[in-house]
Every structure is written in structure tokens, then in C-alpha cells.
Amino acid sequence: MSASTHAPALRLAGLTKTFDHKLAVDHVDLEVPRGSFFGLVGPNGAGKTTSLSMAVGLLRPDAGHAEIFGHDVWSAPERAKALVGVLPDGLAMPERLTGREVLTYLGLLRGLAKDVVARRAEELLAVLELDGADKTLVIEYSTGMRKKIGLATALLHAPRLLVLDEPFEAVDPVSAATIKTILRGFVAGGGSIVLSSHVMALVEQLCDHVAVVDKGRVAATGTLDEVRGGRSLEDAFVGLVSDQVSGVKELSWLSSP
Ligand SMILES: Nc1ncnc2c1ncn2[C@@H]1O[C@H](COP(=O)(O)OP(=O)(O)OP(=O)(O)O)[C@@H](O)[C@H]1O
């Protein structure tokens, strides 16, 4: 499946979503350049997961568009979804299958040849250090193992864009280093990545572009250096969402008498 020549890897235009009269995402515009490693950061409840879910066709927006390499996620879903690998928040997995069975099932569902699925599943399980758990059912996986098998399912069909919601959450440092190497290699090979994270140091380490989302809106976006403006990303982030930080009251009853 080819990607349209000049379009960005991901383009969000006016994406909006309301839940029960509460505006969760408010006219979000965002461009993820091809070949970029793009970090999405924001406070709890800022609208990151909702935006990413709409971006990849998991949640229908109330208004706006999402395009993956120029293919509209809602009017051309087959083209768009062939080009993207997704690690959603709280990924639902077939719990009574082993990791290898999950990969085989999803690979065949994607239309990959049986031998291709078998080879890639073998490599992914080995690289993500899940081969030891090959006989283990997903229901017995730890949270970190679930993240890793989720990442494997996102990579299986060799997408050109990865959209990863908190890929490092609950992942141990050794596995995190492995995942970082895989993701850097993916970008070095011409792929594009959007990931959300609360860990600023990790975003600074990996990403070349960043967007800060706050209260359903994009508060800042650009290259990492543009958004940081000579500060650490954490300081820039806190500066952009500072009304929440300055409003924190001390819990006097926690102090020793
Ligand atoms: N299915 C839903 N039903 C009702 N409200 C929702 C639903 N999903 C999200 N929301 C609300 O939308 C807002 C944005 O939530 P979202 O999960 O997108 O934020 P987030 O930036 O990903 O947060 P976090 O960093 O805590 O994961 C929040 O106020 C949340 O309570």
C-alpha cells in the first residue's frame, strides 16, 4: 500500500470530541512530519488518548478530520489503517491465547501470508524477550508484558507510522531499553512515530518533535528545541500548564505537629 507522496505522516484538522457535554478535545490541529519521532505530552485528562484514538480511527470525532499519509481515516479506512500500527491505551487482547497465537491470529486477519506471520512472530517474541512466555496465556501476562505484546501486534504488518499511547508505562528498564532501540531503528529506517508519555526525560531522549496538549487544545507544538525554548521540557511543560501547578494547596494535616 503506497503512501501519498507529500502528505505528512499524520494530520489532524479541527478534531473535536465531547463526552456527556464535557469538551474533551477542542479543535485539535496537528501535523506529524514524515520521518519524525513525535512526542505528545499533557497533564492527566488533557485529551491525549482521545485525540490519538480519533487519529487512528478507534473513536469517531464529533468534528474534524484525521489523515494518515494523506488517507482519510474515516472515508478511506483500509488505506489509512494499512499504513499505521497502533498501541492503544488499555488494549483489549484475546486473553485465552498465548502471545504467539495472538500474533498469528492478528497477522492472518491482516492478510499476511502464513509463513510471513510465523517468521515475524518468532522474531518479535525473541526481540521483545517474550519467547520465554511463549506458552503463557495473555491473561497471565503482567502489565509490562501486555505492553510488549501490544507493541508486537502494532509492528507485525510493517506499518509506516506507529501511534503508541504510553508505550513505556509499567515496562521495566531493560525492556524499555529494548523498545527504545526498536523504535529508534524504525525511525532510522524511514518510519514515523507518535507517542504519548508523561515522562519528559524519555520524550527529550527520543523525540525530535513535541506537542503539549492542555484542556483539549494544543498549547504548543514544533521541534523539541522550539517547544523547550532553551529550558528543559519539564520546565517548558510546567510553564504552559502552570495554572494547575500554582493552584496546588498544601495539605497541612500531613505535617508533623
Ligand atoms: N469514554 C469516555 N467517557 C466519558 N469521558 C471520557 C471518556 N474518555 C475520556 N473522557 C474524558 O475526556 C477527557 C480527556 O481524557 P483523555 O483520556 O483523552 O486524557 P489523557 O490526556 O489521555 O489523560 P491521561 O494522561 O490521564 O491518560 C477527560 O476529562 C476524561 O475524563
Image (cartoon, rainbow, N blue to C red):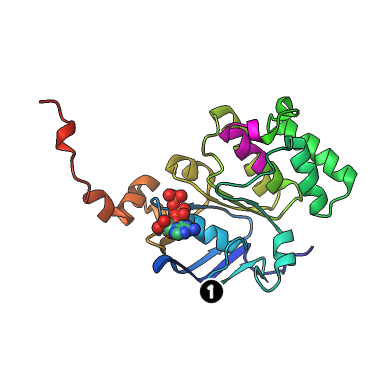
| Residue underneath mark 1 | 64
Decide which of 181, 131 is in the foreground and name it: 131
Residue 66 to residue 85: above or below: below
Query: Where is residue 149, by image quadrant?
Result: top right
Task: Tell me which segment is drawn in magenta.
Answer: 139-150
- Residue 27 position in % (x across, y down): 45, 71
- The residue sitting at 55% across, 68% down in the picture is 12
Residue at 53 percent of width and 48 percent of height: 207
Q: Quadrant of ligand 1?
A: bottom left
Say whether residue 164 is visible: yes
Q: Residue at x 55, y 33 (%)?
A: 171
Nearest the viewer among 36 and 68 is 68
Q: Quadrant of the C terminus?
A: top left
Q: Position of residue 110 (x, y in %)?
A: 79, 54
The image position of residue 141, as x and y in percent, is 63, 32
Q: Quadrant of residue 147?
A: top right
Mark 1 residue type: Gly
Q: Is residue 70 above or below residue 140?
A: below
